[in-house]
Amino acid sequence: MLTGSNLLHTKQYNLRLVHEVIRLFGPLPRAEIARRTHLTGQTISNLTRELRELGLIVEGDRRQEGRGAPSTALAINPDGAFGIGLDFNRDHLTGLLLDVAGNVRHRVHVELEFPSPAETLELMVATVERLIAERGIARSAVCGVGVAIPGPMYPTPDGLGYLVNPRSFPGWHKVPLADWLQARLAMPVLLENDATAAAAGERWYGAGQRIGTFFYFCFGAGLGGGLVMNGTAFNGFTGNAGEIAYLPPVLAGDAGLGSGDDSEARSHVGAHFYLPRLYEALRRDGIAARTPADLDALYGAGHPALQAWMDTGADYLAGLTLAVEYLLDPEAIFFGGRLSERMMQALLDAVTRRLPGRRVPEKAATARLLVGTAGEDAAALGVATLPIHQCFSPAPQVLLKRGAQQATPAFAFGAHA
């Protein structure tokens, strides 16, 4: 249960708490907010007045509940605050403008061909400015920008952030993307592993809302993994939890990835799911494919080369699924990302057929396999929510002074204390 304190020094926490209760359960009258938070009626009156003055909540209809005068319900103001999410990989950039009520207010998408760090910075800045300008919102209402990037990420020396360091990005060695972007935009920037971001997006906006512990296979330019444990995305010690693609391909016997001197293909299972590699293989066979939509068209036409890729992928995913089941014991395993829904469903079905003969009989309960419902923008949704969460979450750590990662927009709680 979310509960509060009447102590003066916890005012910032209580403001966040009341805002969160209204966001999750509203519209609510003040008496109900007091009941849910264990705060006094006078404290609730003071806090909700400040939230209304900040433009973060609004008064709704008056309700008649039992005897006495009707009470006024309080609701979140969707126009009160926003988060921006950027989902970046070597083949695309998707930008979302998300309001505090969880509604997508604007979307920008660009297909890419491996831009340089400098090109990426300019594109990200332009995308953020476009999201703000085209919807006519005030910059002061933006909590910050979340950026989903492929891993692995490299922690900064101060431990407060990450450097971009993906293995598949030549020329991107320890790029301080968050610092660059924050300096250009003059607003908080938060980085997150793209698969973890997608898992968070599924948790907040997809079928994961009803599932506390799950693993998320993220099909982007490559294969990633995200983990939600007891309702919270798990990052790991260095922010790289879930890098399942780097496991060795010892899972499917001789259905292996590579041959001859193709050492990378034999070293980790993710090489099979690396889409630029697949596109190149198809081009050698005279087949033009550059995007996941092209792959979906080939799949729909029953092209044998793509079907072979799917079959081998299902072999590897079956082994990965068992590894996840036995190590983490999740309630569900989601298939999500940029592949088409029907391709992910086909992979899921093929994995399901392969599992019975591989599980040990003593495995009493197994994870449900599900196609994610947050869609291809799951990662962008996840990171767009991060700055909003930083601004409004009643987590205990908001009472502590932190570094630059703490989101502090113009309406930051405590600024008017």
Image (spheres, helix red, strand yellow):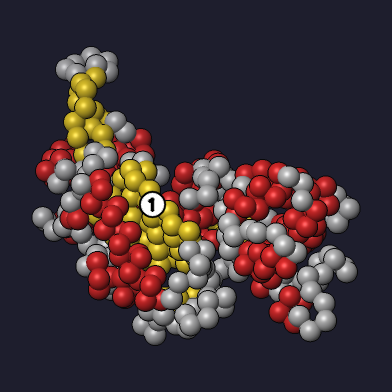
- Picture layout, residue 217 above or below residue 23: below
- Picture layout, residue 15 above or below residue 171: above
Left or right: where 297 falls relative to 59: right
Left or right: where 319 falls relative to 15: right
- Residue 234 seen in render: no
- Residue 111 seen in render: yes
Going 22% across and 22% down the picture, which residue do you hit?
A: 61
Going 11% across and 43% down the picture, which residue do you hit?
A: 53
- Picture layout, residue 266 above or below residue 414: below
User: Considering depth in this image, is 312 or 92 the residue closer to the camera?
Assistant: 92
Going 33% across and 50% down the picture, which residue do you hit?
A: 97
User: Considering depth in this image, is 71 or 194 the residue closer to the camera?
Assistant: 194
Q: Secondary structure at mark 1?
A: strand
- Percent x, y for residue 161? 38, 75
Instruction: Tell which residue pokes out farthest to the top in this image.
Output: 67
Q: Quadrant of the N terminus?
A: top left
Q: Quadrant of residue 256?
A: bottom right
Query: On the image, numbered disc 1 is attached to which residue?
Result: 108
- Percent x, y for residue 367? 70, 49
- Which amino acid lies under the numbered mark 1 shown in the image of this protein? Val
- Picture layout, residue 75 above or below residue 15: above
- Percent x, y for residue 399? 26, 63
Q: Quadrant of the C terminus?
A: bottom left
User: Considering depth in this image, is 93 or 362 the residue closer to the camera?
Assistant: 93
Left or right: where 134 falls relative to 380: left
